[in-house]
Amino acid sequence: MSSLHERHVAVSPEWLALYYRHPLELTHGEGRHVWDADGRRYLDFFGGILTTMTAHALPEVTKAVSEQAGRIIHSSTLYLNRQMVELAERIATLSGIPDARVFFTTSGTEANDTALLLATAYRRSNQILAMRNSYHGRSFSAVAITGNKAWSTTSLSPLQTLYVHGGVRTRGPYAELSDAQFIKACVADLEDLLGHTRGAAALIAEPIQGVGGFTSPPDGLFAEFREVLNRHGILWISDEVQTGWGRTGEHFWGWQAHDRNGPPDMLTFAKGIGNGMSIGGVVARADVMNCLDANSISTFGGSPVTMAAGLANLTYLLEHDLQRNARRVGGLLIERLRAIGAAAECVREVRGRGLMIGIELVKPGTDEADPDAATAVLEAAREGGLLIGKGGGHNTSVLRIAPPLSLTIAEAEEGAEILAGALRSVG
Ligand SMILES: Cc1ncc(COP(=O)(O)O)c(C=O)c1O
């Protein structure tokens, strides 16, 4: 009888990567912990890619899902759906976008695809500005705005994409500049780029690049970009798939670190809101959302069961002020990791905010990315009972730490201790 791993390999696409030399089967979870099929317990610092937002097996979400499933699982958007309207109302208010309309999808990819559809229709242009080192999803259109080689599965594209500087602060041509000079240089680059184009539709950007290794520009860059975009009538789409719902601690949305010139025209979300149930969506100004002149529908978008989960999850998040917890526990965790990193020769940088922390690894004494070290630390952390992620546009050499937002101080301490040991083990 083949192992589950062998069966997975035999039946799955080769490009569907698994973590670990001996891949894990996770069978259940509770709070910030998960268990594998052999009964071993792990502290979960990755939450299934920033998706288990509040906690594993949160009773409030489980109850909402099972009660709704017992009533009706699916009805479609052809009929009124109380849960969908209620969640849309709450997200519209939270978004900060005036006269906001919300459209639900089933993934972040589909959310961004919708935002691109809206922007290109609204502006009658297929030109998109995206950031270098970006990731926005796996569909044909989302891949067309991916500035990360490792995730660019095709160069064929329905869009003309122009890549802008600014997502990566400590590498690249502007790395040595001060924050103010960095912003100035990126704005000048954008102005120059626009001088060579004909009416781009939108700029899409992650406030903190997720797959790209938790990199971000100095606060305020996108507000400066906004001023330039406004002059050209170009829309700003903030991809909040990883940064939304208070994960960054200081802000509820990542764009709020760049709010001097108001909110974006569109915001996309997914991952954490459903705590694992498949919810994605777009919030847009009414005139942008309503610019399509034909029907559009997502059969599973806004399903009663996922919406019930989203409502229960969001209610828990807000009632327990998990944004504040992300700021407080994340602040302590990053300080602790910075101290650990300072003593480890392979650590180039510990960065991030809230519970979104990246540790970039290099070959000691150089600035050269070390993906092998990242893989080795991932394995060693697992051995120690801790699950983390990795990413980074420069050869996947960044450890990614993004636990559920209910993380306790004791758990943060425990995870940091395991990580310190894992880093020591690779030198
Ligand atoms: C910033 C960002 N946007 C979009 C996506 C795509 O979301 P999904 O995998 O739900 O399609 C991701 C996924 O990692 C992401 O990190």
Image (cartoon, grey):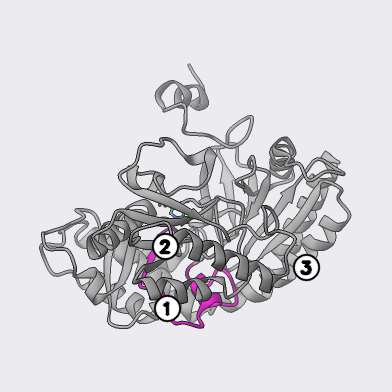
**Image marks 2 and 3: residues in contact by CB distance under 8 Å:** no
Residue at x 32% of width, y 70% of height: 283
Give the x, y percent position of residue 238.
Answer: 43, 66
Q: Quick one: 180 or 90, which is closer to the camera?
A: 180
Q: CA distance from mark 2 to mark 1?
A: 13 Å
Q: Secondary structure at mark 3?
A: helix
Label pair 3/1, CB-CB below 8 angstroms? no
Real-space CA distance between mark 3 and mark 1, rounded to the nearest whole angstrom: 30 Å
Q: Which residue position is annotated with label 1? A: 263
**Magenta residues?**
244-271
Quarter the C terminus occupies? top right
Label disc, if present, on residue 335 of the rendered structure:
3
In the image, 189: left or right of 261? right
Above or below 274: residue 418: above
> Can residue 354 be seen?
no
State yes or no: residue 270 in magenta: yes
